[in-house]
Amino acid sequence: LGLAWNGRQGRTPDQLTEATAHAFLGSTELAPLFQAALTVGNVERALSPLSSRAAPVSAFVQILLNADSLDLDNVSFRSFKKARIELQASLAGLENLKRRCDFNNDQTLALLEMEVVLELTILACRIGQSLCMLGTNPLPTYGCQMINVGISNLSPTARTDLANRLLEIKSRFQHVWLCRNLHSTLPEGFVEMEKYREQFLERCDGVNRYNPDNVEFLEKYVREQCDKQCVDMEANLTLLKLYQLNPNLYNERIVCRIFLKCVMALPSADMVLAKCLLDEYRMESECLKTICDISALLETCRFKEAWQLIRKEADLVDLAIGFEEHVRQFVAHVVSITYQNIDTQLLRQLLGDVNDSDFEKLCKQYNWTRKDDGSTFITNHEATIKSRNIEEKIEFNDMMSFIRDLSSEK
């Protein structure tokens, strides 16, 4: 690909792109992908007079990062326009390639990455065009001089359009980067859970959703959720429905795990959904009653009693790793939307008698401030109140009867 920037290379562009496509991707049909790379190289070489002599970098990089420092004496509006046309033609070629070819995962990612590169370079050309258009200064003798007026002096409309386009490209780049690097950046547990999710969607598709053969897999999935501190409520509800349809397969231990995950998801209504899929006589179980009691105490903000019950039933709540941490997050959420100031000792009790280090971490996480008088400042709710503007829209037809009444009175 480095040959794209070498003006003295002897091969024709078609030979170069086809050979590269065959060597890297195993198919000459993907030559337009490398033709796009060649186009970017040619355009970069044509705009090389823009590059800073003090710090030689790509012209495109300089335009995108520090357009105000560009030296426009050796380029013109036409230079950027020609470059933009060539880049847009390459982008159109990639669109046609997507329509007529099937790609594997690596080829798809390479195609998406090249599209992002083309879109960024096209945006750079748009910025250059805008600066040249505004900075053209006719000379009194002959010709004109290019003056870089800077991005800040472009029209508000032009700046807004360029900024919005840059945000769109940034969003696409983030998506492509995550697709390329997801497995290397996420913890191993999350990658494994993603595989379970894919298997669930594959096995429980359509009429196979409530196949009893899926129970064993779904039970294993629930255990993994409890161990990896993840949740897939759709899969859990599917398993509860299978228990309802196949009473002989019912596993109370697994149901307890599902109920614990529902409590950890507060303030969502997952617990209500789970209880609706369980027969009434199943709810007579002591362990399920205990979990429901914990949920009820938390939802009614009786946090001290909830913590007492949680500590009493430690063996039960330990079925779901991270249960106490999630409950503590729910309590902190309720405190944040309820209090402006609260006694520090009371706050620590509501959070389950946390130690000093954990309490400091929660204060930092939720922006709470400890005061010298023994209280903790939560937030100023009066500063966050938003007024509502009520607009009454009256249509002309609604006024017709009123106008007729006025006319008749005259």
Image (cartoon, grey):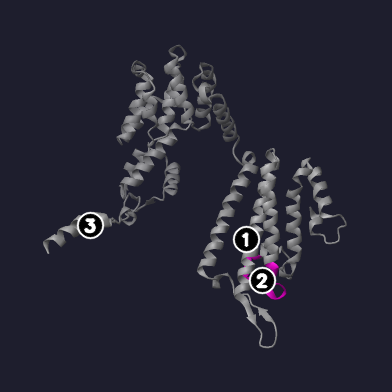
Q: Nearer the viewer, residue 91 or 224?
A: 91
Left or right of residue 74: residue 228: left
Question: From the image, which quarter does the C terminus lie in?
Answer: bottom left
Magenta residues, as a range? 63-80
**Looking at the image, residue 145 lies above or below residue 334:** below
Query: Which numbered circle lies on residue 335?
Result: none
Numbered label attached to residue 77: 2
Residue under circle 1?
123
Residue 321 in magenta stretch: no
Amino acid type, callout 3: Met
State whether residue 238 is above or below residue 156: above
Which one is earlier in the sequence, the residue at label 1 or at label 2? 2
Along the polypeptide, which appears first: circle 1 or circle 3?
1
Give the Cα distance between marks 2 and 3.
Answer: 57 Å
Which residue is labeled 3 in the image?
Answer: 399
Decide: few, some or many residues near mark 1? Use Cα within 10 Å; few <14, some 14-19, many ≥20. many
Disc 1 is placed on an element classified as helix
Q: Nearer the viewer, mark 2 or mark 3?
A: 3
Instruction: Kindly indicate whether the residue at mark 2 contacts the one at mark 1 (C-beta within 8 angstroms).
Output: no
Tell me the SS state at disc 2.
helix
Q: Quadrant of residue 59?
A: bottom right
Q: Is residue 180 above or below residue 406?
A: above
Q: Residue at x 42, y 33 (%)?
A: 264
Query: Who comes first in sequence, dot 2 or dot 3?
Result: 2
